[in-house]
Amino acid sequence: MLSFLFGTFGLGYFIYGKKQANWIAMVCGAGLMIFPYFVSNAWIMVAVGLIVMALPFVFRDN
């Protein structure tokens, strides 16, 4: 279920980044869609997912 959740957010980040030409959002979106395949522990998946979801807000390129 967490994989689906982070994958959905990843798709949204990726589409937003592509439309806005924001490479940080695109990379984070791709990462959110891919990383659940490699992480099996739920707590680590939540921690990594939340960190990757926060990166576009921390590193804004204006």
Image (cartoon, rainbow, N blue to C red):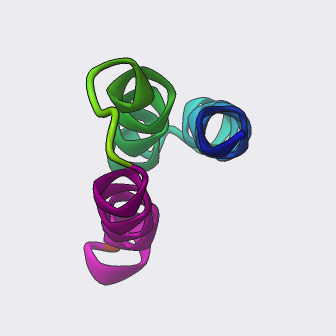
Residue 29: image location, x then y, percent: 49, 37
**Along the line of sight, the residue nearer the viewer: 27 or 51:** 51
State the residue at coordinates (41%, 73%): 54
- Between 48 and 23, the one lying in front of the other is 48
Left or right of 33 on screen, residue 59: left
Residue located at (29% from left, 33% from top): 39
The x and y percentages for residue 17 are 55, 41
**Is residue 62 visible to us here?**
no
- The image quadrant that residue 51 belongs to is bottom left
Question: In this picture, is 55 found above or below 13?
Answer: below
Is residue 42 found left or right of 35 in the rendered image?
Answer: right
Q: Nearer the viewer, residue 59 or 46?
A: 46
Residue 12, quarter of the rendered image: top right
On-image quarter of the N terminus: top right
* Residue range (magenta): 42-59
**Badge count:** 0
| Main SS of residues in magenta | helix
Place residue 36 in its image quadrant: top left
Furthest toward the front, the residue is: 41
| Residue at image location 39% in from the left, 18% down from the top | 37
Q: Tell me if residue 31 can be seen.
A: yes
| Residue 44 is one of the magenta-drawn residues | yes
Q: Residue at x 44, y 62 (%)?
A: 46
Q: Is residue 51 left or right of residue 22?
A: left
For residue 20: magenta? Answer: no
Q: Which image quadrant: the C terminus?
A: bottom left
Q: Residue furthest bottom?
A: 58
